Amino acid sequence: MKRYILIHIIILAIISNILAQEDVSATFKKMITVDASWSTAVPIGDMIADVRTTSGRGFQFGVAQYLNERFSYGGNFAWQMFYENDFEVFINEYSVFSGYQRVYVNAFMLTGTSKYYFPTSVNKIKAYISLEIGASAIENYQIMGMYEFKEFEWHFAISPGLGVEIPATKTIGFQLYMKFPYSFKANSTYHYSWINTGVGMYVKIPN
Amino acid sequence: MIKSIIGVFVLILLGGCYPDLSISPVESDSVYTNRHPDAHFTEYKYYRLADSVLRLNEYGEFILGEGQYDQLIIDQVEENLNSRGFIKLVEGDIMKADIDVYISDLSAISVMQFWNYVPYWYYTLGDDSNADAYYPIAPPTSVMQIPISSIMVDMVQHAPSTTKEDDTLSIYWRGLCSGIYDIEMDSRMVRNINQMFFQSPYIKSYE
């Protein structure tokens, strides 16, 4: 975990350094951006032991304010739901247990976001890198046969990502992104992580 | 007004995307098998199979009676054992047996009671107290009864005629299948008993 915090500090330091060198445009107004997107996710890491299927059930909402042309900060709310129903066989040393297993993983993430927009753009399409830090609430609910298992924990979560914003008009545009949400182990749980891709729209509200 | 309609529409859409939490009787089936670490199945050849299914109540007491699927279960166990090279012994020849096979029916009706408020006794009595100790309990708001089918197949060390009541015999192998007692019971019984043997490939007699 220390390693990720250190990486975040380094990235923030780099961004701050870049910002310090920027000549902030006097015409640039601080704007607020509201976005909504549909997100898909592919589980990775320890999570594969429970669920392997790609999730198409998810959405994200965000709000951000530009500090200047390069940098914005804000908040993000995300929900992603993973589901798998398959016949499973669990083998112990002398025992075997088999049956249909259903796994429902509901993940809610509430994070603070910082984005850095690259200065170069093609056709006004702006690319950015982002880092989100916050908390995630994850419920892992499994049913096998007539037995069930339920676990709910809050996790410390980070989510580095990259994306592009494609303006359609002066205030409305589309966004594409890829993120790597990572929820750290809490109590008896494992580390939850997945690769998140999303497509959505944003609205810029001039301040 | 239009915003509310759109909001409700989005909620319905999201609700529709959520996977169904209800469980079908077929999906409730599970099969558990366990073998004794000291059992050497390739040293056994002849078995004795009880000609009826033993019925046990929740206190482990025998109950008289015959179930609708008893003969089907017995035939299916016999078929699987014969296909693994074991030979069934009949009356008069039973002293040659290496193993005895017993089939038990542990089916029960699971009763679940629900209150739509926290009953008084729930928070006034500890774990070591009986729920009907002191306080009158209000009738539950709803009661759910689930008939559960539970079939157990035991492969036991053959008991010679000199066996005393307090002698212990090893259970070489145990298979247990359970599920909600509902539709398609005959095909489910056959499939579950076959699954017991399928997930126990070590059950083979000597040639």
Image: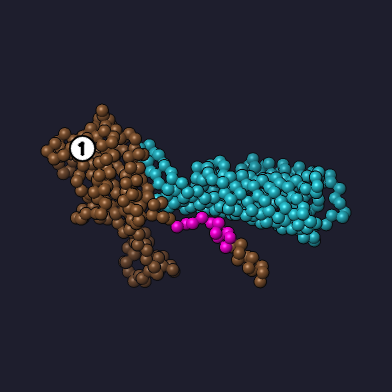
Chain colours: A cyan, B brown
Tell me if A6 is positioned left or right of B13 in this view. right
Q: Is residue B198 above or below residue A103?
A: above
Task: Report the residue marked by disc 1.
Answer: B88
Identify the image quadrant of the C terminus of chain B: top left
Number of numbered discs on residues: 1
Q: Residue at x 55, y 56 (%)?
A: B17
Is residue B70 or residue B171 the one in the foreground?
A: B70
Q: Is residue B31 above or below residue A170?
A: above
Q: Residue at x 62, y 54 (%)?
A: A59
> What span is in magenta?
B12-22
The image quarter in which residue A45 lies: top right
Identify the image quadrant of the N terminus of chain B: bottom right
Tell me if A200 is positioned left or right of B153 in this view. right
Residue B18 sits inside the magenta stretch = yes
The outermost residue toward the right is A26
Is residue B73 or residue B55 the one in the foreground?
A: B73
Q: Position of residue A182 (x, y in %)?
A: 60, 46
Tell me if A132 is positioned left or right of B69 in this view. right
Q: Position of residue B68 (x, y in %)?
A: 25, 54
Is residue B142 or residue A15 the one in the foreground?
A: B142
Tell me if A20 is positioned left or right of A158 in this view. right
Q: Residue at x 20, y 44 (%)?
A: B50
The kind of residue tagged 1 is: Lys
The outermost residue toward the top is B207
* Residue B128 visible (yes or no): no
Q: Residue at x 21, y 42 (%)?
A: B49
Q: Residues within 10 Å of mark 1 (few under 14, many from 20)?
A: some
* Residue A35 visible (yes or no): yes
Q: Position of residue B44 (x, y in %)?
A: 24, 32
